[in-house]
Image (tube, rainbow, N blue to C red):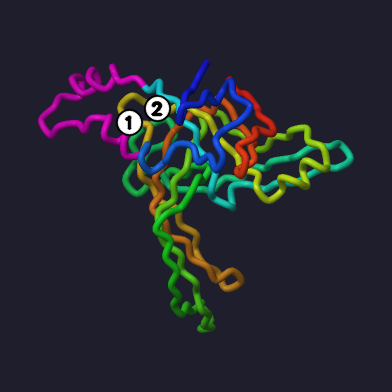
């Protein structure tokens, strides 16, 4: 299997371009929504199902994780292992993971691999708890882009010498190579949901983001040095 991006073959190459950024998830999200037709007001369900059943999703993409809270790197010098923990962010989905329409008032929750945020804005306001105590609340808004993998990935480890781990510690990046899929043909692989974190008195931070999400099947995860493009390790899932 080959994927050619920016004139290089990712699967067969041991190097990427320097400062390799992969595909722009914002553009991919928009393209997927444009590709998927909207059911017409007077269109029969059977006709619509026939139309969308012919759509194929064979394109392969490479997304660089730019959201700091997604990745946690830990090095084990005794076993010479770099351990990468992929932490998820929970969002609400207007459809269930199986693609079934939601019931009125029902929210489906999904764990996503957050890729990036855009349009971040920070403001503050005074919050009051049930006892009348006041606290300054920091409010974060924007748009978060992410992936829902077909198969969950919690963490991976790769062999790495201590000197190499020390050298690349600050420039390590993770690339997810994946293809899109849809759990249900009646729903596109991309959808818009919401990411909300309610503030508390002990943690006075509110997160209120529009979530733009793509369903994917992860084929490969690669760890590379952003400054040189050198691939330091990989894990295949296909």
- Whether tag 2 and tag 1 are in contact, CB under 8 A, the answer is yes
Toward which corner of the image does residue 122 lie, by quadrant?
bottom left
Outermost residue on the right side: it is: 78
> In this view, which residue lies farthest toward the left?
42
Q: From what the image shows, is residue 128 above or below residue 80? A: below
Q: Is residue 35 magenta?
A: yes
Q: Position of residue 38 (x, y in %)?
A: 21, 33
Image coordinates for residue 66, horizontal then vertical, percent: 53, 48
Residue drawn at x 42%, y 26% is 181
Seen from the viewer's position, the closer of residues 6 and 72 is 6
Q: Which numbered dot is residue 182?
A: 2
Q: Residues within 10 Å of mark 2 (few under 14, many from 20)?
A: many
Marks 2 and 1, the one that precedes in the sequence: 2
Q: Position of residue 106 (x, y in %)?
A: 38, 46
Check disc 1 and report its element: helix, strand or loop: loop
Quadrant where the C terminus sits is top right
Please give the range of residues in magenta.
29-56
Camera-nearest residue between 107 and 225: 225
Q: Residues within 10 Å of mark 1 (few under 14, many from 20)?
A: some
Q: Which residue is mark 1?
A: 187
Question: Measured from the top left, where is residue 206 in percent x and y?
Answer: 48, 65
Q: Nearer the viewer, residue 27 or 13?
A: 13
């Amino acid at each position: 299997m080959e994927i050619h991006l920016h004139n290089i073959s990712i699967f067969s190459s041991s190097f990427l371009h320097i400062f390799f950024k992969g595909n722009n998830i914002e553009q991919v999200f928009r393209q997927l929504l444009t590709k998927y037709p909207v059911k017409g007001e007077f269109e029969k369900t059977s006709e619509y199902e026939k139309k969308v059943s012919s759509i194929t999703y064979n394109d392969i993409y490479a997304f660089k994780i730019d959201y700091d809270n997604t990745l946690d790197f830990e090095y084990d010098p005794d076993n010479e292992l770099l351990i990468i923990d992929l932490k998820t962010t929970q969002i609400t989905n207007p459809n269930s993971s199986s693609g079934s329409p939601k019931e009125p008032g029902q929210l489906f929750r999904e764990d996503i691999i957050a890729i990036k945020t855009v349009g971040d804005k920070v403001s503050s306001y005074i919050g009051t708890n049930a006892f009348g105590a006041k606290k300054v609340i920091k409010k974060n808004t924007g748009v978060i882009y992410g992936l829902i993998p077909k198969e969950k990935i919690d963490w991976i480890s790769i062999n790495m010498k201590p000197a190499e781990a020390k050298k690349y510690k600050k420039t390590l990046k993770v690339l997810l190579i994946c293809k899109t899929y849809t759990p249900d043909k009646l729903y596109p692989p991309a959808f818009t949901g919401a990411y909300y974190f309610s503030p508390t008195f002990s943690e006075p931070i509110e997160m209120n983001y529009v979530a733009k999400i793509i369903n994917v099947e992860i084929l490969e995860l690669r760890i590379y040095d952003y400054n040189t493009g050198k691939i330091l390790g990989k894990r295949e899932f296909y």
